[in-house]
Amino acid sequence: MLQLIDVGKQSVDAYREIVGEEAVLELKKLAEPLRGLRLAHVNATPYGGGVSELLRSVVPLERDLGINADWRVISGDEKFFNVTKKFHNALQGMEGPLKKEDEETYFVYNIRNAQLFDTEYDVVIVHDPQPAAIRAFFKAFHPKSSTKWVWRCHIDTSQPNPAYWNFLKDFIDDYEAVVFTMPEFVPPDFKHQKMFFIPPAIDPLSPKNLPLPEDLAKKLLAWLGMYPEERFITQVSRFDPWKDPFGAIEVWRMVKKEFPDLHLALVGSMALDDPEGWEIYGRIMEVDNQEHHLHVFTNLTGVSNIEVNAFQKLASVVIQNSIREGFGLVVSEALWKETPVVAGKTGGIQMQLAEGGGFLVSSIEECAERVIYLLKNPEEAKIIGRQGKEGVRKNFLITRLLRDELRCLASVL
Ligand code: UDP
């Protein structure tokens, strides 16, 4: 059996006061014909990163709407996840050949997981490349199955490494539907008869995004060893080359020339399927040991949802120094707390800052410049942050994501 993740309960009615009566009624209407549907979401990790964040919130709501939704996680070990991280990087454009032995590893683990997948579902949504080949092998183990399959890609595949993409594409072609975050992410040669574009979204009722009283937020950070009376900027993200945490440190060093007392909090989580994170974390800690006012926090040392909430709320500016980014939930999370964001002009970040909320930048220098501007103009920074929140309310809350997913589900049945 593929591991089943326990997700707790939530009701769509609880969102009424945030998104309005109409949005909730629309969800109920769309879900009506899907009542009783057996649905599985399959991904690679129960914690760390945006996909697990989304599934933790979406699955209970689907259940509340009468869909028999489950969240299942594939099994893998370091060998497999080292290979799939190469896939992740290559699909986002990193160069390099696809080795035969890596193909082999990818096959072996996907076959094993296809075999472990012994529960019958009407629809399976497979998230990202790690489990993408399960569908191809599933038939061999379950020849009578009539399951419909949807591949949900969360990364920026606009310029994929051809060796990796051509390998994966053969598996993706067979899916009944394919979902990308935005049209720009469709690989150049890829066509599919059923393609959806669905940006991710944040859950305003998760502990990460609930309104947090300032006093409590300060106590939470003080407990972690931050000095909440000092000004700080933060980057919250996995330790990943595409998020460029070392670039974030450079930005801070530049800003410090004008604001010598400014602190930087680098908040990073370790994901089960991201072994690269450990190596980058080690290198960051070497820098951390030499720098006054730089703080590094992780989920391993007690930083969970509520602490991330406090960081995003109390930061003067949130930076997201990404070079490539599928979506970057952290941007909407920060904006929801009315904190202005300065972030890399890339992928889904561009959508999130399209209606205000901060600045898109293309270099470390530009990023530092914008941070300095916001620090020098706190009143304007507040207005910018507030605008950002309204953009998130309109476009990037979980109820909108659910609506889009319900439409996608209806289309494959
Ligand atoms: N996150 C977290 N703790 C951390 C770092 C990140 O909880 O120390 C969360 C973050 O709040 C967000 C998710 O991990 O909800 C990252 O999603 P995003 O889409 O920004 O990036 P991904 O990791 O999926 O590339």
Image: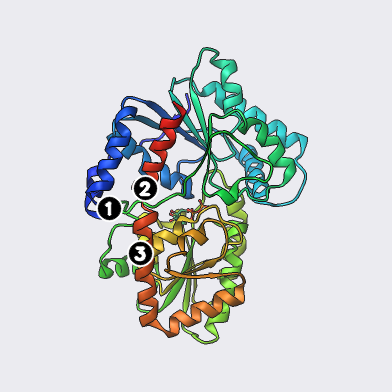
Q: Which residue is mark 1?
A: 19
Q: Residue furthest front?
A: 193
Quadrant of the image for the C terminus? Answer: top left
Q: Secondary structure at mark 3?
A: helix
In this image, 53 relative to 88: left or right?
left
User: Residue, x 60% and y 63% (percent of image)?
Assistant: 244
Q: Secondary structure at mark 2?
A: helix
Q: Is residue 88 above or below residue 228?
A: above
User: Residue, x 32% and y 54% (percent of image)?
Assistant: 204
Percent of width and height locating residue 184: 59, 51
Give the Cα distance between marks 1 and 3. 13 Å
Q: Is residue 356 above or below residue 176?
A: below
Find residue 389 and name its label.
Answer: 3
Q: Secondary structure at mark 1?
A: helix
Nearer-N-terminus badge (1/3): 1
Q: Which residue is mark 2?
A: 400
Percent of width and height locating residue 292: 52, 77
Viewer-nearest residue: 110 or 172: 172
Percent of width and height locating residue 309: 36, 61
Q: Is residue 127 above or below residue 94?
A: above
Q: Amino acid at mark 1?
A: Val
Viewer-nearest residue: 363 or 73: 363
Q: Amino acid at mark 3?
A: Lys
Q: Residue furthest bottom?
A: 258
**Label 3 crowd (10 A; few <14 / some 14-19 / many >=20):** many
Give the Cα distance between marks 2 and 3. 15 Å
In this image, 93 relative to 199: left or right?
right
Viewer-nearest residue: 9 or 283: 9
Q: Amino acid at mark 2?
A: Arg
**Label 1 crowd (10 A; few <14 / some 14-19 / many >=20):** some
Percent of width and height locating residue 160: 68, 47
Viewer-nearest residue: 259 or 147: 147
